[in-house]
Amino acid sequence: MSAKSSFVVALDVGGTSMKGGLVTESGAVLLSERRPTPRTEGPDAVVAAIRDFISHLAASGEGVPAGVGLAVPGLVSADMAVYAANLGWRDVPATDFTSLDVPVMLGHDVRTGGLAESVMGAGRGVQDFLFLPIGTGIAGAMIVAGEPYGGASGWGGEIGHIPVFPDGEQCACGQFGCLETYASAASVGRRYSLRAGLENVRAEQVVSSDDPVAIEIWDEAVEALSLALATYTLLMDPTMIVLGGGLAEAGPALFDPVRTRLVKRLAFRSAPPLIPAALGVDAGMLGASLLGWRAAGRPELGPGWALDVRSEPLVS
Ligand SMILES: [Zn+2]
């Protein structure tokens, strides 16, 4: 193989930081770095920072990258970053993100992470599953027939805004009783802080506390999650549900009660297993590398692709 096509540049663009790297076609990460996202400086500054970061990464590799892949938030198609509320951009063509003369492909951040879990992570070998990172917010990647599914307009997978409590609290999105309002890491911390009269308590502290108020807040989060996951299970019949993000670090304190309640809630069918995500904070960047390889004309680097650098599937 020539050095010319031995790696792609992959970038996961988040609201506060960007994770970038050089990744080979077998999924090996040759280099990874993190830079802040200058979102307070406006959308043009963010695009310029991305372009600079990609050039810097590319120059660190031997030869020219085969392609560039980017995971970005908001509404996105393969060749256009259509809209991102937190970064302020509208209709930015994929080619604006790099000054390199190589093919570029964009993907939605969570769906790109789901693609990585599907190809080289917890969902390897599984055709239908839900990837649900629970962090500051909650959004899902619906993996349907081996590919992330974005729906008719690209808004598919917004599970965090499924109304779980019809008369519930108002969500930042404007609706009432959304899953995210009760079960995101930020919401668990915020709701407990408010009810206990404290400031800035983190979700991990709530989960591990035996304060009755903390137990109640956590119980509501678990209830909200089990309702949303029952809905997803009944609608999509997934092989499994992969939980990731910061809150999944709670381990059995999250998985056990959600599993128990999901099983109890479903009467005529079995509950899918709940599995921890395998790729952690690297999922977005690794997924972006797959987009980079697809842009470079290697569409076969997808589900079922025989990787030799990762472990066997957790569920098959
Ligand atoms: Zn909402």
Image (cartoon, grey):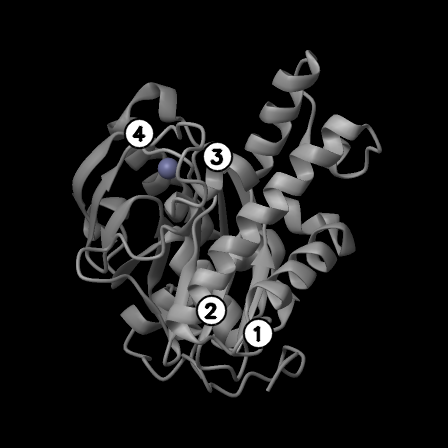
**Secondary structure under badge 1?**
loop
| Mark 1: amino acid | Pro
* Mark 3 neighbour density, 10 Å: few (under 14) some (14–19) many (20 or more): many
Q: Is mark 3 within 8 Å of ligand 1?
A: yes
For the residues marked 1 and 3, what is the alpha-carbon distance in whole angstroms? 24 Å
For the residues marked 3 and 4, what is the alpha-carbon distance in whole angstroms? 11 Å
C-beta proximity under 8 Å, tags 1 and 2: yes
Q: Is mark 4 within 8 Å of ligand 1?
A: yes
C-beta proximity under 8 Å, tags 1 and 4: no
Quadrant of residue 288 within the rendered picture? bottom left
For the residues marked 1 and 2, what is the alpha-carbon distance in whole angstroms? 7 Å
Q: Which residue is mark 2?
A: 233
Q: How many marks?
A: 4
Badge number at residue 174: 4
Residue 312 screen position, x and y as percent: 66, 83
- Residue depicted at x 63% and y 77%: 310
**Secondary structure under badge 4?**
loop
| Mark 3: amino acid | Thr
User: Of 127 and 260, which appears nearest the observer?
Assistant: 260
Q: Which residue is mark 1?
A: 272
- Residue depicted at x 57% and y 65%: 242
Disc 2 or 3, which lies upstream in sequence?
Answer: 3
The vertical placement of 33 against 122, above or below, is: above
- Residue depicted at x 41% and y 42%: 53
C-beta proximity under 8 Å, tags 3 and 4: no
